[in-house]
Image: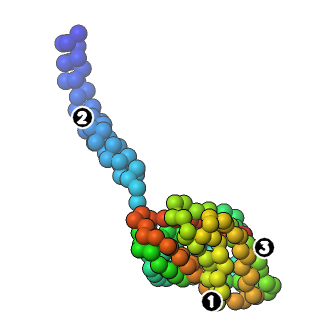
Amino acid sequence: MKSSLIRFYDRFGHFLDPFLVLALVALLFIPAVTVLNLTPRRSAVSTERTVLGLADQSSVSVTPATENENGITLEKITQRSDTAYTLYVTHNPHIAGVYKSEVFTLFNGTDEEKRVPVTATFEGYASGTTIAIVINNVKFIVLGPDGSTYPPTIYIQPQKTTVVSIEVDSPTDVNYTTGFSLDLTVE
């Protein structure tokens, strides 16, 4: 048996060597690529005017703010359909106080007024915290100090841009990142 393997290798060994080298490279390369693909990554939110691939302005578009202020950050925008968006906003650890930041803008590219109802889901906010959406210095409470949620509706005039800010009134120091998601539906 041993001598037949030696004879086989002597006769065909020079043909098998390249395949054995490729198999060895594959054994080292595949685990390395797998580890790289499973490593979590963070990417910045796009600041382009045509966010989410929406190039034509015949509908309502959502664009993130170019600067994040006071630790309030728009982490992610997901377009669920042509008329529905989910925005995930985080607030870094902070001391007690009021924090306000411009988060996104809405542009109505149509010739009619659009309504945008907003619903919110909150994660880990301290009791007594109030969160509001601010448009043209008018506050719309989304999370009341007693933990109640209120779904406001944003009205956007035809061919107009509406700047939306988030205001967080925190009565206590918070030592962890908090977050919430806003679901926008254009009607």
Which sits earlier in the primary sequence, circle 3 or circle 2?
Answer: 2
Q: Nearer the viewer, residue 135 or 142?
A: 142
> In the figure, is residue 112 to the left or right of 179?
right
Local secondary structure at mark 2: helix
Local secondary structure at mark 3: loop
Label 3 and label 2: CA atoms lie apart by 66 Å
Q: In the rendered image, which residue does mark 1 sit on? A: 137
Would you call the spot at circle 3 few (<14 residues within 10 Å), some (14-19), or many (20 or more)?
few
> In the figure, is residue 120 to the left or right of 117?
left
Eye-nearest disc, 1 or 3: 1
Q: Position of residue 125 (x, y in %)?
A: 52, 64
When the figure is inspected, residue 2 is found, relative to residue 53, above or below; the finding is: above
Q: Image point 67% across, 79% down: which residue?
A: 140
Q: Nearer the viewer, residue 60 or 102?
A: 102
Residue 187 disc label: 3
Residue 57 disc label: none
Q: Quadrant of residue 27?
A: top left
Q: In the rendered image, which residue does mark 2 sit on? A: 17
Q: Image point 18% across, 12% down: which residue?
A: 3
